[in-house]
Image (cartoon, rainbow, N blue to C red):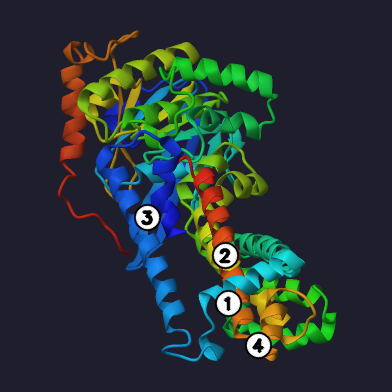
């Protein structure tokens, strides 16, 4: 089983029990100008409780990886397993925090956060209690009755995070969740994500284009190559936990990590991607 | 309808900057002046500029209306038309929304039925009245059916475009949370299509009314359409105008009610 294609990184990988596995996955999209091969022979293993960050040039299949794992798209070749089950059809084992706002605008914050519990038929009293606790947990107390249109971008992200965490999915997928936020807010939310994660130690796959963010949060960072993408480099982050989002960048190992990851990405920037076969 | 969009906020909340409320009330003064001026000119013109046989006069129309109200004719006939419209509207709108949800859920179904639905939609609905009268007689039933058919198509097309415009991201978000198709319909697609549904309903209501009245005019013994037709048959111009005025008041009230309901449903905006 190939875990990673970067020869220098394979040695440091020690995966306990795989929570997520991609084996030889290929994904081709039909676009107007012809087929677009996004992933080819893509393999990746994520251990249980591991926080994995995925970086790569824009247009590489970062979001596709998450969509495939969530079962919203089907691979053309290869297999994907999640918590020792094959993914075919929508994978309800994962909580998926997408890049885009997917709150229901006609529901208040508490009604939005309650959606997964409604789906699971949780009784109304328990639902109310869990929703209240979760909203407080992500720092939205006092905004329960607000509609998404009355919230700032950061608050909407918090509400989405609450809605994703409330049903306690085994695996969390996050697609540039803090992408469009300003730098300060990003740090605040990263810190809260760290806190929430250290309480639950779920498996997390976190897509970002921000190398600093990847190093700050993750146990391991993988770099994708341009289309058709595969894992180009896997970098285990040798910075101890608990980490402080403000101090990570001063850790002795940080510079090395950054240099290696940036080196892997830089080589591909500006290089034409193989769009059409 | 539009008048109330302007007037309602000032009336309901009380506290408003001076400039705005003054402007709103000034518009109301202009509206009143316009109406009074129009009616006065009509009254003046009747018998002087044109034969009252053709244009009647506001005073004669008012006299006819009071006469009808005293005798109970107006209430009786209005109620019948109103019942037909509402029954037809509810049936047509429900069927329209449900059909659009089914057609929206499956691309195959939608593309299969599309040309047929469009072809029937192209028919003038009034042309169906003789068929319905033949089938259902001259009671309320053919009017209800014609109203329902008129409403159905508008609500169907409007809802269908709403259903197809739904943000996939919301649907996908609920799918990963484990929602089934029915729940997605209920929690995402229907609320998301609500603005479109409402556009359809608002367009449909007057058409439903038109359907009911048109069927009444063809064959019936009650309703506002019958009243109009009957007055015209007796060459009673004042009676025709009085019936038309009653129609106008009813449509305005219906639209106003729908507008209020819409404001309440879309309070999240």
Viewer-proximal residue among A171 and A265: A171
Instruction: Indicate which disc residue B232 carries.
Output: 4
Q: Do labels 2 and 4 share a chain?
A: yes
Instruction: Tell me the distance, in whole angstroms, between the alpha carbons under discs 1 and 2.
Output: 18 Å
Q: Which of A1 and A154 is in front in this view?
A: A154
Snapshot quadrant of residue A30: bottom left
Mark 1 or mark 2: which is in front? 1
Front residue (pair A210, B1): B1
Q: Name the residue under label 3.
A: B28
The answer to whether residue A117 is above or below residue B74 is above
Q: Locate residue A44, reporting x and y percent.
A: 42, 36
Q: Are marks 1 and 2 on the same chain?
A: yes
Q: How many labels does the image show?
A: 4
Badges 2 and 3, same chain: yes
> Label for residue B60?
1
Residue displayed at 53% across by 56% down: B256
- Count residues near mark 2 (Cα–Cα under 10 Å), then give few for <14, some for 14-19, many for 20+: few
In this picture, residue B29 sits left or right of residue B122: left
Q: Are marks 4 and 1 in contact (CB under 8 Å)?
A: no
Give the percent coordinates (x, y) of residue B4. Answer: 45, 53
Label 3: how many Cα within 10 Å (few below 14, some 14–19, many 20+): some
Q: Which of marks 2 and 3 is nearer the N terminus?
A: 3
Residue at 51% x, 64% y is B161
Label 3 – label 4 distance at C-alpha = 34 Å
What numbered label is drawn on residue B249?
A: 2
Callout 1: chain: B
The answer to which of marks 1 and 2 sits earlier in the sequence is: 1
Q: Residue at x 82, y 81 (%)?
A: B138
N-terminal label among 4 and 1 = 1
Instruction: Place residue A139 in its image quadrant.
Output: top left
């Amino acid at each position: 089983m190939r875990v990673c294609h970067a020869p220098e990184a394979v040695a440091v990988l020690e995966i306990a029990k795989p929570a997520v596995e991609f084996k030889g996955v290929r994904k081709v999209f039909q676009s107007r100008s012809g087929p677009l091969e996004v992933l080819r022979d893509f393999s990746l293993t994520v251990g249980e409780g591991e926080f994995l960050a995925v970086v790569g040039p824009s247009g590489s299949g970062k979001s596709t990886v998450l969509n495939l794992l969530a079962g919203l798209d089907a691979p053309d070749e290869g297999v994907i397993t999640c918590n020792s089950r094959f993914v075919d059809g929508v994978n309800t084992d994962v909580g998926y925090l997408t890049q885009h706002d997917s709150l229901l605008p006609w529901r208040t914050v508490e009604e939005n956060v309650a959606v997964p519990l409604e789906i699971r038929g949780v009784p109304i009293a328990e639902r109310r209690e869990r929703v209240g606790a979760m909203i407080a947990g992500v720092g939205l107390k006092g905004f329960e009755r607000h509609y998404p249109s009355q919230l700032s971008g950061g608050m909407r992200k918090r509400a989405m995070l609450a809605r994703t965490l409330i049903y306690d999915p085994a695996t969390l997928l996050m697609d540039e969740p803090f992408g469009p936020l300003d730098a300060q807010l990003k740090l605040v939310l990263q810190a809260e994500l760290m806190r929430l994660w250290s309480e639950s130690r779920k498996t997390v796959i976190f897509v970002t284009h921000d190398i600093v963010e990847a190093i700050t949060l993750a146990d391991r960072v993988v770099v994708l190559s341009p289309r058709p993408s595969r894992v180009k480099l896997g970098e285990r982050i040798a910075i101890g936990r608990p980490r402080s989002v403000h101090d990570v960048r001063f850790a002795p190992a940080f510079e090395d990590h950054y240099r290696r990851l940036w080196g892997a990405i830089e080589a591909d920037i500006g290089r034409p991607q193989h769009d059409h076969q | 309808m539009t008048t109330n969009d302007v007037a309602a906020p000032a009336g309901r909340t009380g506290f408003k900057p001076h400039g705005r409320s003054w402007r709103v009330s000034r518009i109301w003064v202009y509206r009143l002046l316009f109406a009074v001026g129009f009616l006065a000119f009509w009254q003046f013109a009747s018998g002087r500029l044109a034969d009252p046989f053709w244009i009647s006069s506001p005073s004669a129309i008012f006299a006819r209306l009071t006469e009808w109200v005293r005798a109970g004719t107006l209430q009786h006939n209005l109620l019948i038309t109103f019942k037909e419209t509402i029954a037809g509207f509810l049936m047509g709108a429900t069927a329209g929304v449900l059909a659009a949800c089914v057609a929206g859920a499956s691309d195959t179904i939608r593309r299969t039925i599309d040309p047929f639905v469009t072809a029937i939609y192209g028919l003038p609905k009034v042309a169906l009245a003789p068929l319905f009268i033949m089938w259902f007689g001259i009671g309320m039933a053919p009017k209800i059916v014609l109203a329902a058919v008129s409403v159905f198509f508008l609500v169907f097309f409007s809802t269908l475009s709403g259903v197809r415009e739904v943000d996939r991201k919301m649907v996908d978000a609920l799918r990963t949370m484990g929602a089934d198709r029915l729940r997605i319909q209920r929690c995402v697609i229907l609320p998301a299509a609500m603005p479109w549904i409402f556009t359809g309903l608002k367009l449909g209501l007057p058409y439903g009314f038109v359907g009911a009245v048109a069927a009444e005019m063809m064959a019936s013994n009650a309703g506002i359409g019958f009243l109009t037709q009957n007055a015209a048959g007796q060459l009673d111009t004042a009676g025709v105008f009085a019936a038309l005025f009653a129609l106008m008041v009813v449509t305005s009230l219906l639209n106003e009610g729908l507008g209020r309901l819409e404001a309440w449903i879309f309070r999240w905006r």
